[in-house]
Every structure is written in structure tokens, then in C-alpha cells.
Image (cartoon, helix red, strand yellow):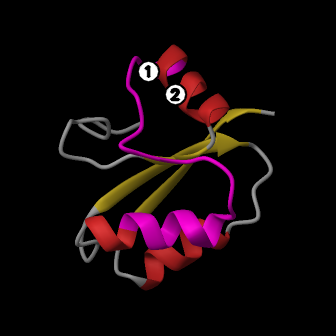
């Protein structure tokens, strides 16, 4: 990962407590937005409702196999999205 990607001002979103726990175990940081239940589109709406995304970097940690809907929706809102697989 690039320098500063996990800086406090960079919002981190994930789906589920397991992903949040993996993020903390790997990088020592908890996610700013954690969606329990729901689908990726719900997480995208949650983040977009609380953060001005245009021009912002958003880190999406998660499983190696993801649908990609969340990243696509956040990019549509103008975010620069980095998807990082943390577990299988």
C-alpha cells in the first residue's frame, strides 16, 4: 500500500465485523463505516450519506472474491477506491 493510505483522514469502509476484525489484525486500524447485514449497495449509500466522496480515497478491505458493486458505486460518486483483499 502507498504511503498514507491508512492515514486517519482516509475513510475505511467494510461489510461485517469479520472484515473489520481482519483489518484491525492486519493494519491495527478499525473501519470508519461497518455495515452489519445488508448488501454492498447499502454500505455505499451509508458512506455516501456521511462523506463527500468526490476526489476522496476510500479503502475497501474484504474477501478476495467480491461482487465489486460497492467499489463501482463509490467510484460513480467520484471516489478513488482501493480494494484490498484481506482473507479468502
Residue 44 on the magenta span: yes
| Depth check, front residue: 7 or 16 | 16
Residue 28 visible, this orientation? yes
Residue 23 marker: 2
The residue at 52%/18% (across/down) is: 26
Which residue lies most toward the bottom here?
A: 76
Number of disc labels: 2
Magenta highlight range: 26-47
Quarter of the rendering containing residue 18: top right
The residue at 44%/21% (across/down) is: 27
Which residue lies most toward the left here?
A: 9
Residue 84 visible, this orientation? no
Q: Secondary structure at mark 2?
A: helix
Q: Is residue 69 above or below residue 86?
A: below
* Residue 45 place in picture, x, y as percent: 47, 73
Residue 72 on the magenta span: no
Quarter of the picture containing the C terminus is top right
Which residue lies most toward the front here?
A: 37
Q: Secondary structure at mark 1?
A: helix
* Residue 78 place in picture, x, y as percent: 34, 80
The residue at 22%/36% (across/down) is: 7
Residue 27 marker: 1
Q: Is residue 39 found left or right of 81 in the rendered image?
A: right
For label 2, count other residues whose C-alpha is less than 10 Å away and answer few (under 14), some (14-19) or many (20+). many
Amino acid at each position: 500500500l502507498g504511503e498514507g493510505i491508512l492515514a486517519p483522514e482516509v475513510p475505511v469502509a467494510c461489510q461485517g465485523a469479520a472484515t473489520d476484525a481482519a483489518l484491525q489484525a492486519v493494519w491495527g486500524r478499525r473501519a470508519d463505516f461497518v455495515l452489519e447485514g445488508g448488501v454492498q449497495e447499502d454500505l455505499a449509500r451509508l458512506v455516501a450519506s456521511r462523506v463527500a466522496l468526490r476526489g476522496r480515497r476510500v479503502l475497501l478491505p474484504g474477501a478476495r472474491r467480491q461482487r465489486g458493486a460497492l467499489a463501482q458505486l463509490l467510484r460513480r460518486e467520484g471516489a478513488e477506491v482501493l480494494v484490498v483483499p484481506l482473507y479468502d
